Image (tube, rainbow, N blue to C red):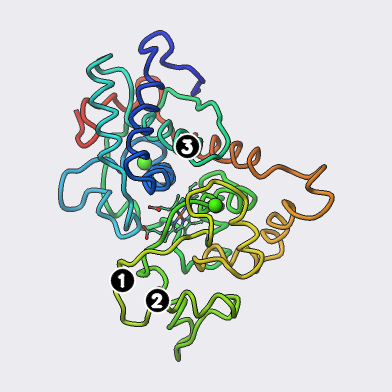
Amino acid sequence: QLRVGFYSQTCPNAEEIVSSVVREAVASDPTMAAALLRLQFHDCFVEGCDGSILIDNGQGSERQAFGHQGVRGYEVIDRAKAQLEAECRGVVSCADIVALAARDSIALSNGPSYDVPTGRRDGRVSNSTLADNMPDVSDSIEQLKAKFRQKGLSHKDLVVLSAAHTIGTTACFFMTDRLYNFFPGGGSDPSINPDFLPELQATCPQNGENSVRLALDRGSELTFDNSILSNIRDGFAVLESDAKLYQDEATSRVVDSYFGLLSSVLGPSFETDFVNSIVKMGQIGVKTGSRGEIRRSCRSFN
Ligand code: HEM
Ligand SMILES: [Ca+2]
Ligand SMILES: [Ca+2]
């Protein structure tokens, strides 16, 4: 139902406007690319890709959900929306701005470029309890697979989309259980490479500052590349959920498929597969036709 170039007649500069706003935002804060990519995931996984996470109507609105902890980039979406309203009032949805901003962020991080099917309309609900089922770092691999399957995404999509962690950072907040409390009696996740554990513990000391941040893809936090997959394979995954991708038969096979002598010539390309998976993610629960609305402000319903 979505189609590439949905705004080509009604707002021909729409995609360029979003790109220029994202370009400026990332130029002044390089960490913004990762934030905007994560924003699309969190939008699409709750009520579909409908801008529901953007609604800011105080207590109980979706963006305050625990499952959305640390999601950023809202002001970039607002800036793009303001320019789009000035150029073509009431035409471009906030949901599409989120999808386009994620695409532009990937390209700005040296990742693949791709066409984004557009035509999403904005949702009319926002409730923090709707985000209760977001994938969590401490979910089992079966839970992660199931949460993706519920959205029409396969275990391969789970691996490929988790590799979005090739850019960005995490707060130590998400690391404490993995580093100090992995078992009922304490201790750290044994899947962490012993060469890596001291480094992680130095950055995130027990009872230290929860808001300190560390790269999700060691050594490559600003570049969209497959280094996250070799880090996961080698025990250098930062998030517990990423590490688990290599502890399961089916998902580890997907990780391995991007390496080895043959795969470099004949094998699947991570970048091609990522584009397919994120375009698929971008279709989750979309509202088109007369469903939903085109918000005037991304922070509030019309
Ligand atoms: C498989 C389940 C997933 C879990 C459990 C998970 C969990 C997390 C956590 C805990 C963080 C750190 C947040 C912070 O401290 O600010 C994070 C960051 C991030 N996630 Fe995920 N994530 C998952 C899947 C995804 C997917 C599917 C995408 C996009 C396609 C994605 C993109 C990102 C990005 C780009 C960041 C960095 C954000 C930044 O630097 O501000 N994640 N994720
Ligand atoms: Ca949503
Ligand atoms: Ca990287």
Q: Kindly give the residue lying farthest to the left in the view shown.
A: 58
Whether residues under marks 2 and 1 lie with C-beta atoms below 8 angstroms apart, the answer is yes
The x and y percentages for residue 95 are 36, 32
Q: Residues within 10 Å of mark 3 (few under 14, many from 20)?
A: many
Report, in whole angstroms, how far the alpha carbon at label 1 lies from the one at label 3: 29 Å
Residue on which disc 3 sits: 108
Compared with 242, 92 (above or below) is: above
Instruction: Identify residue for label 2.
Output: 176
Assess disc 2: are there few (<14), some (14-19) or many (≥20) residues with their C-alpha within 10 Å of its C-alpha. some
- The CA distance from mark 3 to mark 2 is 31 Å
Q: Residue at x 49, y 23 (%)?
A: 2
Number of other residues with Cα within 10 Å of mark 1, as a class: few under 14, some 14 to 19, many 20 or more? some
Mark 1, residue position: 210
Element carrying mark 2: helix
> CB at mark 2 closer than 8 A to ligand 1?
no
**For the point 65% across and 60% down, which residue is it?**
230
Residue in the picture at 21% in, 32% down = 301
Q: Helix, strand, or loop for circle 1?
A: loop
CB contact under 8 Å: marks 3 and 2:
no
